Image: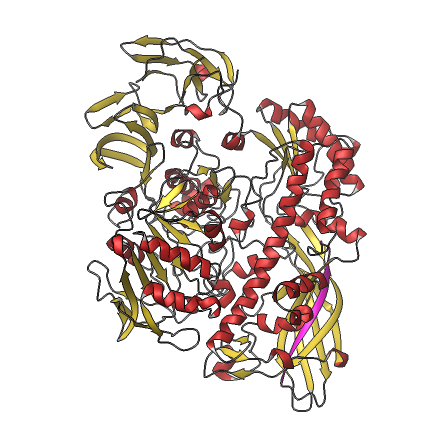
Amino acid sequence: MKIVKHEGKRRLFDQSQTLILMDESTLDRIIEDPSQPLLQQEEKGVSGEETRMYDTTTSLLDVCKEGEANGAQRLEVSYDFFFGGSKRENYPDSPATLKAYKIIHDLAKEHGMGFSASVVSPLDVGGGYAKSHRDTGRTMQFKEGLIHADGTYQLDMIYQTQWTNNKGPIKLKLAEVTVFAFNEERIDGTPYYFVDENKIENISATVQYQVDESSIQVSKDGYGRGNIRVYGKAAGCGKNRCLAVLVYETPELDYFSENAADYMKSIIDMHDQKGIQYAGFYSDEMHIQFDWNLVDHFGPDTEINTRYLTDSLAHTYADKFGRQYEDFAKYLVYFAYHQHDFLPGEEGKLPSQHVFGKSREDIVRTWMFRKCYFEMLQRRVVDLCKETKDYAESLFGGPIMTRAHSTWQEAPTCDHFYDNQRFQVSNDREHTRYEYTPEYVWSCSIRENMSACYDYFKWNEYLTGGGTDHPEGGFIDRNYYGSAFATSLALLNKFPFSYYGFWGSPKPVLERLSDVGLTYGNQSLGYELAHNFIQGLTPRISDVLTIYPLDLNYLEERFGSWMVQYGYTDYITEDKLLQFAKAPANGRIQVRDRSYRAMVVFCSPLISAESLKLMKAFAEQGGKVIWCSAPALRAEEGILDSWKELFGVRALDFPYGGLTAKGKLVQFTGMKTVQDMEILTDFLPDYIYPVVADGAKVIAKVEERVVGLQKEYTGGGAAVYLGFRPRDDQSCSLGADVETLFSILKEFGCYEEKGCEISSRPAESRYIYNRFPNGTVTLANHMRTIREGWYGTFYRDEKRDAEILKDVELTPREISLKEAEILGRKISYEGIGALSYRYSDQDGLTGFAGRKTTGIQIDEKVFYFTESPADLAWYKVDKQELEDEIKQAYAVKCDTEALIRLPFNASGMRCALCRNEQLNTEKEYNFTVKEMETILEISPEAVGKWIVFYQQ
């Protein structure tokens, strides 16, 4: 019997069985005989993992039987060459794929499972498209060089032959070599170089090139490359610079082609005609073709400088932004960043970039040009996938589950923080992943942008439920940014629940990371779900909303993640803010079903007039707007003027793109509780942006330059300008807890005075705790001071990890509360891991989850559940979760044989043992009621299973 409705967020808890295709030959073996082993040999793939996903005896039949035994609702098929395989020949429309998928589909159905496969991912569909279409994808690789006085030029470039990602290797075909000539002029000692777009000349008629065939090789990670020399003589062209462009054909869609959507839908039709019906689309790491090698090409000297560019993309861009962009290839000049190594001295080391003109407005217009390109590409790819998914749901019914995240190169997880850093190799403790230092090298954000997966919030429209793997590969998210980010995606998703995926660290470390993730309401993959059910399957409440800084990567491609990994806020992009925000009122701004006291803006100089209008209305209605870093710099639509008025600024007091202030102090002359803050680097994120005040109170200076203002509004509102990056690093990554941002937010009353975030963030706080809309409070020990220093592989060697952890001081997991005041109540409790409780004066205790505990005391009320410590969870199921015929229900789980006393009266209710988290009853179960308590004996067969009390 069903107790809870199998819809909405509950669908995220469907059991699924995974089948990973790591080698193309697997399809042939499935077609020949699904009972034969999936693998004939144990290939390691690019991951280098020692442990394999399957052994050489496991068959498809075995996988299906296992799924049936586990009660799986879906069999999910994916390609993942990360764990094995060396070539890819079959795609969703290939005959072998259709035959094999039909067999898998039917066998899964025989074993009670629906079917899911990776048939919508751009990486999967592209190979088939390229076999039947001429308008395939194209990527253009570029490099800047000199044109000598006699007109000769010569550039030595990387010649690419193969890219690899988790969907398999692809071949690149060099279609043509193009060269553009231009002159550049450095602007007043800045890293900006003026190039007149109207005087860029195509000199391709002069070009010659020579590939060094002997240099071509394929790395262990599957990246194929060699050397190519591009040269020629453009006598009399009058130019001193050139941009050589290698144009490659890639086996993927032309995403801007008129037939792209029809092609993707035709794949769905093919499968439908074969009798293959879909309950899900495996959708992990959605992006377009690019090479994910983090070793052989990452950073200023080896990065693949490419952009996806087809004729139809150029035509679409020109339609939207101006006919001059029809010849888009020449505008690659304005993407060429940090490519002046051919110049002598310091000038050759500059983070150079080309801009449209010599004024600040021209520089900003260049940034907008890049922003529009990346946004247009990202949106088009997501919209194609979403349109195809919608079409499939119209055929097969819905929802079709597409649970996963958009990329595995999340910033800052995969950023490079020092020269010669290697992903998954033990971290050097002299360097930090939590703060900018002078050793910082490069962000992976540019790779995400190039491959159309940087805007996680846009992909949130296609994916089912929120989720992220930010703490992967050994990075453990000590500032909780990844956890806050995952919940932020969930709040905007059609299925508002998030997962927090992590791997690459020793198990004791991941357990502590899981505890913290649970306090945010995240499903920590592989760990107990009980806390999530008690919380109402929703993220925690935050008082602050932060604009996620997509702009930074458009200003300078080296940066992207902003490096204020702040975990005490919700995140949103400007687009989603404008889509979901309601008119501010009573000191709050509401976004969907959440409201906020304050809005923080991280580095958004390209913000729109509409967003500034919303911020002003918020301040006028009593809200707090905290603006960080560069001002709103666009002149069109009066944006800059509106920004000045909002923050009380008369004039900008800096040239071009800001000022460097490395080693200087931000002094908070107008604030009582904020400590002075050192500026760490001369990188773009640490630039300062002084201003001249116009009636606003000065609250911060660097030397004598004003970098902080506070403008008061009636009703208690305020607009605060901070013309710098306010640091915040609870992980003590540089030796001390820096809490500049938190202190500012606290002083301006952005948090509830005795709320969770105010109590959790200070350095002396042992616990982090959060509250939830249904009244639940969840807390756990902080793990912010664990020092990382281990290898980052997926599969772990516990003995090796134990040796590593001898030198690591782990934070405690034990919880010991003695009349601790939490949100106005006194709590006493002993246990480990995470604690969740739901209590109100009206209903009493209606939910609890704890480990190695006997009970909890709330104010004067004592609740003893067991005589001996146990892992125990129980909760009253929310009425809206219940099937229509069920009036009320309680769910209980315990990990050991025990006699449990529960503080509710189950008289008149039935009791049953359940099969899974969906609370589907399996068999009747006995209980007694005594003195308004329900007494339940956990038998051996009930250990670790949900038991449900219900009333019809």
Q: Residue at x 63, y 79 (%)?
A: 198
Residue 868 occupies quadrant? top left
User: Can you say which quadrant of the picture contains the C terminus?
Assistant: top left
Residue 736 quadrant: bottom left
Q: Is residue 233 magenta?
A: no
Q: Main secondary structure of the magenta part?
A: strand
Q: Nearer the viewer, residue 302 or 845?
A: 845
Q: Is residue 242 magenta?
A: yes
Asked whether the viewer can see residue 29, the reply is no
- Which residue occupies the foreground of this view, 112 or 466? 466
In the image, residue 147 sits, relative to residue 375, either above or below, namely below
- The one of 791 and 634 positioned closer to us in this rendering: 634
* Position of residue 426 measured from the top left corner of the image (x, y, whole percent): 46, 54
Q: Is residue 304 visible?
A: yes
The percent coordinates of residue 503 (x first, y second) are 49, 44
Observer-nearest of 713 and 408? 713
Magenta stretch bounds? 240-253
